[in-house]
Each structure stands twice: as structure tokens, then as C-alpha cells.
């Protein structure tokens, strides 16, 4: 390729002469030379025009004379040199021109070339009058500056977007929620990675297509296949970097700020620092490669090369970068493609490794059921045996028998908890916390089991172990015969979870949530659509377009109902509901109860609640959980009968007659005791076996004749009374 360069070189005392710069090697690059005087405005007034490699002796002499003239009268002589291979000149450290100067000269000499071919009339003369000087040359090239800076920002902008989405799923435990509904790690990775790669590829495609439609040489002149390979590899590297960076953040806001800052700084550093280094021919190549290990700089280098080739191509008219140009000594495209490709592979591996370690605690271990680890027993469980209630002891015996008979026996029940315990490690100077103390439980495949307990009793810790959020410290549990320590992946496909806090995507609609989780439960086509509609109707989210509103616009109650619907979609055989009715108004709660009542007919449901009314309405069996252990297990009636051998008698009279009321109560039930007293209102607990209802009515009628009785009432023991009694007894 013939290259033309215009040199307006000013000699001073310290600079080398033009002849000395034109060493033997350089001379080989010179194709021709044109000299003319500054005084003339006519470019055709040439002093010399010739070929240094000419065969004729005469021409050779002329050429030597031209050099002498140049050195002796440099201020008055202009020179145009035709080079074959200008890059070689940069190997000579004495050559004083930066690549930027050469590019401008290239532009000028191209105009001159066109003039020589008779295509440009007087234009080159005008152009040459404004020939770039050193000062002019140092001005930044606005085209270079804008295109690379703008393009790098456009491309890297995707990084914060992906990072935000990934950290959002992490922060809101949506990843865990998806896992709990059967989406395995491999599938999650394939789907998420594939999704982001497709989105990135479409984004890059639009970038190239729009650029091409606008006619920008950056896109149209460079070989599209080179651009495809370059953008595809970078898009993949960027996606895997987003996955890797997700491990560093737990909050979307922090991740966004850091990522956008990185985008901004990468562009600026690339453009104002890295580009400067690239344009210094003497800057060590190894350092450039080291800097390109930073993905932002390797992207910048690739864009820079595409831009430079497009620029040169637009001037010389021979197109931009082609595959054979990747062999060019100064073309960094080949090295950045290799660097980015290796980084992509390493980053994907690292990100997957870190993700597996952080979510499942192991990378290589995939134990099979045949290699069931022994169940560690804690000392705590042995000591608590002496104090356990008969029904708790009976439950333990059932579990021990089932476990002794083997996994097949355990599989008869929906849930078998075998001395399951959870101990949280010591933190911030506090001792280790035993949240669940050796629990035994066997739950049938049909029915609802309710867990009651005061705040901090350990209900959520228990559910968290059962749904794989945390691992048991001691003991284990079986769900449909599968061990929660090793078979969680299989268990996820058969359970449904309504967590204590709603784990939902704010930007998705209720229907989209159900469609997504329905698909995870292998529902497809018409069956999926039908199941989603039924779920929406069941939880009262179907009518009035609510189902198609974004979850961000839902009230707390609506979100809760959606969480319940998610837990039941796909017909899971075991469902865990952690306080499902929290925040619901009475009508919605009743609606929800109907859903649960219907659902429990053909599956096992474990439900935690603080509402005694709910527990009574929904649960076939109840366990009262206090301070990490079950205090009693029975149905509501049995519990009330066992713990509620009393009637609560309330009476309101005037204060001066309080003593008379007390005497009356003592007569009715000698062991009665006062549980509440405020002004004239008193509340007594009467032992059922000491009183008859008729006697109480009669006593009140007689009392009414002696002093004013403003109000009175008699109530049987409620579940709430039982709960308070059990909780009090356990904590004393
Ligand atoms: N990650 C943890 N690290 C240390 N202690 C914890 C952790 N999670 C829970 N705990 C403690 O374990 C105990 C049981 O907590 P848990 O949340 O299981 O109770 P809960 O019965 O579900 O309470 P609530 O009804 O308020 O939801 C509490 O004392 C709690 O402070």
C-alpha cells in the first residue's frame, strides 16, 4: 500500500537533521520524494520529485542533492515523502513524530494524492497552506476522542444494569426462593447467563446496526466479522464479570454506585490515560499488555484500533480493519481478543465456583443417598429427655421407630424430624444461640400442622432448616423420605414455601410470578394457564386487573396473598407457610383460610402463626414451641381440655362491693384465684371440677339483689389461655 506523508520539519540545533533521520533502513521505506519552496503557492513548483531507488545514477544524485537542500534550507523547503511502511520508522527512536502527527499528515497527503490524480482541483493547495505544525498537531482529535469515549460508555453501561439485577435477586433472597421452588444451580446459571448474554448480544447488535445506518465509518469500514467476534467475547466477559462481582455486594444501591462509578472512570481513564500511552511509540509494549488485563482497557484498545483503522481507511479509501490486519505489529486487536477470551473463561469458572461455595457450601461434593452421613447427636438432646411432656415423648418414640425401620418407613410420613437442632455460632461476644433444641416430629402426608410459639421461639429457624435455607447443626429431617442434608435438590421439586417475608420481584406482575413458579414446577401450556388463573382467583387477585399490575403497586396484604399462591402452585406435596396471614384484613384472611383448608386435603402443610384463631381454624394438630423445643403436641380440643381445667368468671360491680364478690367466688370454688382486677371489674379462674354452671348463675342472681352488678360473664378456656400457660410454664 502506498502511503503519503507530508513533513514540515523544523530543524534546531539539537534536533537531528532530516538526512540523519533518513537512515538506510528508513530509506528503504521511502517510495518517493517531492520538494518545493515555501515562497510559492503553487504546489506544482517542485524542486524535486523522484524515486530514491531509481536505477539511473542521475536520479540517485538528484535525490542526494534534494536531501542536502532540505537540511541546508529547511525553513524554506517543504517535502512530501511517499512511504511504503511508515511503522518501521517508529523502530528508530530518533524519529520525532507521534502516530497522531502521522495520521494528520496522512490526511493531507491523501488530499495531495487526489490532486495529483486530477480529482481535487485547487483544494490541496488550500489545504497545504494550512499545513499542520507541531502546535496544531498536539490539539486533541475530537473525532477520536468522542467516538472511543462514547462507545466505551455505551458498551460498559450494561455492566451496572446486569449487576443491579443480580444483586437485587441476592438482596431480596429471590435466588433462594427460586431454588426452593425447584430451580437448581445449574439451571439458574444457564438461564441467567443465557438471558444476559442474549440481551447483551442484542444490545451490541443494535449498537452496530444503528452506527452502520448512521454511516459511521467506525462500523461500516471495519470487517463485520471482526466486530462480531470482538463484541461477542467482550459481552460474555462482561456478563461473567457481573456474576463474579455479585459476590461482593449484598445491597443494590451500593452495587449501583460502585458500578456506575467504574463505568465513568473506565471511560475517562481509557481515553485520557491509556490512549496517551498507546500513542507513545516508546512506551513498553509489555506495560500496555499488563494494562489491557483490566477489561475496561482491553475494550478500549479494541475500540481504539477499530477507530484508527476506520479513520485511515476513510482517508486512503481502502476500508478499515480486515482479518489480515490483525497480523500488523501495532494492531492491538489480536492481543485484546486473546486476553478477553482467556479472562472470560477464568471469570466464568471463578464466578460459578464462588456462587456454589456461597450457596451450597461445597463445590465438588454431591453426595448420593447411598452415602448418607451419620447423624451427629448433641448432649443437649440427651439432657432434655428427662423433662419432656408425654405427648412430646410419644412423638419421639414414633420417630425413633420410623428411623430404626429405615428410609422406606420414614417415607410413609410427609415429614420426619429426627432430633433436628440448630445452633447459631457465637457472634459479637454473645455465646452460641441454640434456636432449635433436638426436635422430634412425624407429620402425615395429609393435614395441617400448626406451630405456635412466642417471638424468638425458633419457628423460623426450624422452617429455614426444612426448606434448605440453613443446615441443621445436629440431627436431620426427612421430607417424603428424602434427607434434608443431602437431597435438598430433589426435595425442592416437591415442596412449596411461603416465607415469613415476601420474596417477590417488584417489577413483575402477580400473574408473571405465578407463571414463572408454575413453569419451575413443570406446568406447561394450558395446564399452566389454568393453574395460574385458579391460584389468582383463590387468593382474590384475579379480578379488576390486579393480576397484571406490577408487584411494586401491591399492598402488603396483596403481596402476602401472592406469596401464598406461589407456595401452592404446581401441586406441591409438602408446603411450609411461615405466618401466612400476617398483615391481612379479616376478609382476605378468611379467603386465605379457605385456600389453606382446601389445600390441606391432599398435602401436608406446616404453618407457623401467632393467631390462635387461625391455628384453631386451620390446624389438625398443634405444637407449642417455646425456647427452641416443643412443649406439647396435640389438637386444639385436646390442648384446651388438658391445660384448660378452668372457667374464667368476669364481673363488674361498684368498688365497695369487691370484697363481697370475692367471698361469693370463694364459696363457688374454694381454689379459685383472681387473675385480673381494675376498679370494680374482677376476673377469676374457677376450677371446672369444683363448680357447676347452674350454681354460678344462681349466685349471680342472688348477688344482684344485694348490690349492683353492671356486667358479668363466664368463658371457657381459649387456646390463647393454653398458649400463655404453656409458654409461662416453659420459661419458669
Ligand atoms: N442467623 C442467626 N444468628 C444468630 N441467632 C439467630 C439467627 N437467626 C435467629 N437467631 C436467634 O434464634 C432464636 C430463634 O429465632 P427465630 O427467628 O427462629 O424465632 P421465631 O420463633 O421464628 O420468631 P418470630 O415469631 O419472631 O418470627 C432467636 O433468639 C433469634 O434471635
Image (cartoon, helix red, strand yellow):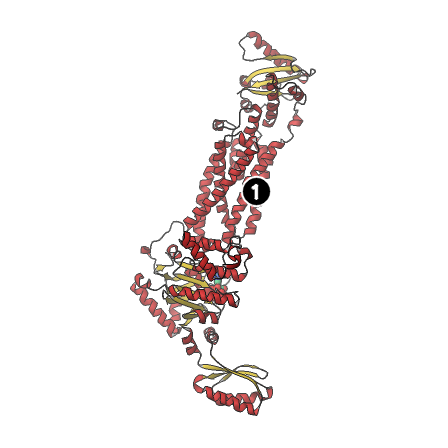
The residue closer to the viewer here, 317 or 457, is: 317
* Up/down of 169 relative to 500, above or below: above
* Up/down of 79 relative to 259, above or below: above
* Up/down of 484 relative to 273, above or below: below
Residue at the location (48% across, 62% down)?
539
Horizontal and vertical percent position of residue 375: 35, 61
Q: Residue furthest right?
A: 39
The residue closer to the viewer here, 535 or 682, is: 535
Q: In the rendered picture of this protein, how many numbered marks are placed on residues?
A: 1
In what element is the residue under mark 1? Answer: helix
Image quarter of residue 181: bottom left
Residue at the location (53% across, 66% down)?
585
Residue at the location (42% across, 78% down)?
641
The residue closer to the viewer here, 544 or 704, is: 544
Q: Which residue is mark 1?
A: 263
Image quarter of residue 554: bottom right
Q: Is residue 163 visible?
A: yes
Q: Is residue 80 left or right of residue 720?
A: right
Horizontal and vertical percent position of residue 147: 59, 34
* Up/down of 439 relative to 262, above or below: below
Dot 1: few (<14), some (14–19), or many (≥20) neighbours within 10 Å? Answer: many
Horizontal and vertical percent position of residue 726: 45, 74
Q: Is residue 173 visible?
A: no
Residue labelled 1 has its Cβ within 8 Å of some atom of ligand 1: no
Horizontal and vertical percent position of residue 275: 58, 33
Q: Is residue 39 left or right of residue 193?
A: right
Amino acid at each position: 500500500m502506498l502511503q503519503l506523508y507530508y513533513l514540515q520539519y523544523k530543524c534546531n540545533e539539537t534536533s537531528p537533521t532530516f538526512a540523519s533521520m533518513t537512515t538506510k533502513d528508513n530509506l528503504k521505506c521511502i517510495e518517493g520524494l517531492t520538494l518545493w519552496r515555501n515562497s510559492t503557492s503553487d504546489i506544482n513548483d517542485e524542486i524535486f520529485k523522484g524515486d530514491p531507488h531509481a536505477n539511473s545514477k542521475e536520479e540517485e544524485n538528484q535525490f542526494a542533492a534534494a536531501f542536502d537542500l532540505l537540511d541546508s534550507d529547511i525553513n524554506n523547503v517543504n517535502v512530501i515523502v511517499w512511504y511504503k511502511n511508515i511503522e518501521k520508522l517508529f523502530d528508530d527512536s530518533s524519529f520525532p513524530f507521534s502516530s497522531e502527527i502521522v495520521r494528520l499528515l496522512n490526511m493531507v497527503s491523501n488530499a495531495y494524492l487526489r490532486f495529483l490524480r486530477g480529482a481535487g482541483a485547487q483544494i490541496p493547495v488550500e489545504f497545504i497552506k494550512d499545513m499542520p505544525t507541531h502546535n496544531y498537531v498536539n490539539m486533541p482529535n475530537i473525532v477520536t476522542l468522542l467516538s472511543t469515549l462514547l462507545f466505551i460508555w455505551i458498551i460498559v453501561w450494561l455492566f451496572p444494569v446486569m449487576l443491579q439485577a443480580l444483586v437485587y435477586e441476592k438482596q431480596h433472597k429471590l435466588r433462594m426462593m427460586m431454588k426452593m421452588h425447584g430451580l437448581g444451580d445449574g439451571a439458574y446459571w444457564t438461564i441467567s447467563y443465557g438471558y444476559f448474554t442474549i440481551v447483551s448480544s442484542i444490545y451490541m447488535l443494535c449498537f452496530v446496526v444503528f452506527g452502520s445506518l448512521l454511516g459511521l465509518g467506525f462500523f461500516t469500514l471495519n470487517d463485520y466479522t471482526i466486530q462480531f467476534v470482538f463484541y461477542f467475547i467482550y459481552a460474555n466477559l462482561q456478563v461473567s464479570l457481573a456474576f463474579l462481582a455479585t459476590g461482593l455486594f449484598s445491597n443494590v444501591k451500593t452495587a449501583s454506585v460502585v458500578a456506575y462509578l467504574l463505568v465513568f472512570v473506565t471511560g475517562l481513564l481509557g481515553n485520557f490515560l491509556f490512549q496517551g500511552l498507546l500513542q507513545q511509540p516508546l512506551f513498553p509494549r509489555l506495560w500496555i499488555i499488563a494494562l489491557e488485563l483490566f477489561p475496561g482497557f482491553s475494550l478500549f484498545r479494541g475500540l481504539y484500533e477499530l477507530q484508527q483503522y476506520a479513520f485511515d481507511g476513510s482517508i486512503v479509501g481502502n476500508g478499515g480493519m480486515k482479518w489480515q490486519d490483525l497480523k500488523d505489529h501495532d494492531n492491538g486487536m489480536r492481543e485484546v481478543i486473546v486476553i478477553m477470551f482467556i479472562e472470560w473463561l477464568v471469570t466464568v469458572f471463578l464466578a460459578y465456583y464462588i456462587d456454589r461455595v456461597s450457596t451450597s457450601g461445597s463445590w465438588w461434593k454431591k453426595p448420593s443417598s447411598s452415602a448418607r452421613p451419620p447423624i451427629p447427636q448433641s448432649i443437649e438432646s440427651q439432657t432434655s429427655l428427662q423433662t419432656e411432656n408425654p405427648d412430646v415423648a410419644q412423638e419421639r418414640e414414633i420417630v425413633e421407630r420410623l428411623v430404626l425401620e429405615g428410609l422406606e418407613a420414614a417415607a410413609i410420613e410427609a415429614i420426619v424430624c429426627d432430633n433436628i437442632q440448630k445452633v447459631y455460632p457465637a457472634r459479637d461476644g454473645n455465646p452460641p444461640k441454640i434456636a432449635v433444641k433436638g426436635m422430634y416430629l412425624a407429620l402425615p402426608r395429609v393435614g395441617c400442622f400448626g406451630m405456635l410459639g412466642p417471638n424468638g421461639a425458633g419457628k423460623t429457624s426450624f422452617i429455614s432448616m426444612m426448606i434448605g435455607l440453613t443446615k441443621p447443626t445436629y440431627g436431620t429431617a426427612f421430607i417424603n423420605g428424602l434427607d434434608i442434608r443431602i437431597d435438598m435438590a430433589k426435595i425442592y421439586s416437591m415442596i412449596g414455601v411461603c416465607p415469613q417475608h415476601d420474596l417477590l420481584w417488584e417489577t413483575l406482575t402477580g400473574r408473571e410470578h405465578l407463571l414463572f413458579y408454575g413453569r419451575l414446577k413443570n406446568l406447561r401450556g394450558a395446564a399452566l394457564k389454568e393453574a395460574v388463573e385458579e391460584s389468582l382467583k383463590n387468593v382474590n387477585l384475579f379480578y379488576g386487573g390486579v393480576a397484571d399490575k406490577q408487584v411494586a403497586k401491591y399492598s402488603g396484604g396483596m403481596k402476602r396473598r401472592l406469596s401464598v399462591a406461589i407456595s401452592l402452585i404446581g401441586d406441591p406435596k409438602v408446603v411450609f407457610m411461615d405466618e401466612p396471614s400476617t398483615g391481612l384484613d379479616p376478609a382476605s384472611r378468611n379467603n386465605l383460610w379457605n385456600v389453606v383448608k382446601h389445600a390441606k386435603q391432599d398435602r401436608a402443610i406446616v404453618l407457623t402463626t401467632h393467631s390462635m384463631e387461625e391455628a384453631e381454624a386451620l390446624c389438625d394438630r398443634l405444637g407449642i414451641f417455646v425456647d427452641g423445643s416443643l412443649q406439647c403436641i396435640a389438637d386444639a380440643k385436646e390442648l384446651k381440655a388438658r391445660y384448660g381445667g378452668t372457667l374464667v368468671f368476669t364481673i363488674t360491680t361498684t368498688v365497695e362491693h369487691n370484697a363481697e364478690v370475692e367471698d361469693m367466688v370463694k364459696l363457688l370454688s374454694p381454689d379459685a384465684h383472681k387473675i385480673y382486677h381494675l376498679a370494680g371489674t374482677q376476673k377469676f379462674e374457677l376450677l371446672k371440677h369444683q363448680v357447676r354452671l347452674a350454681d354460678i348463675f344462681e349466685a349471680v342472681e342472688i348477688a344482684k339483689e344485694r348490690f349492683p352488678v353492671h356486667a358479668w360473664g363466664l368463658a371457657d378456656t381459649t387456646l390463647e389461655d393454653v398458649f400463655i400457660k404453656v409458654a409461662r410454664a416453659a420459661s419458669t
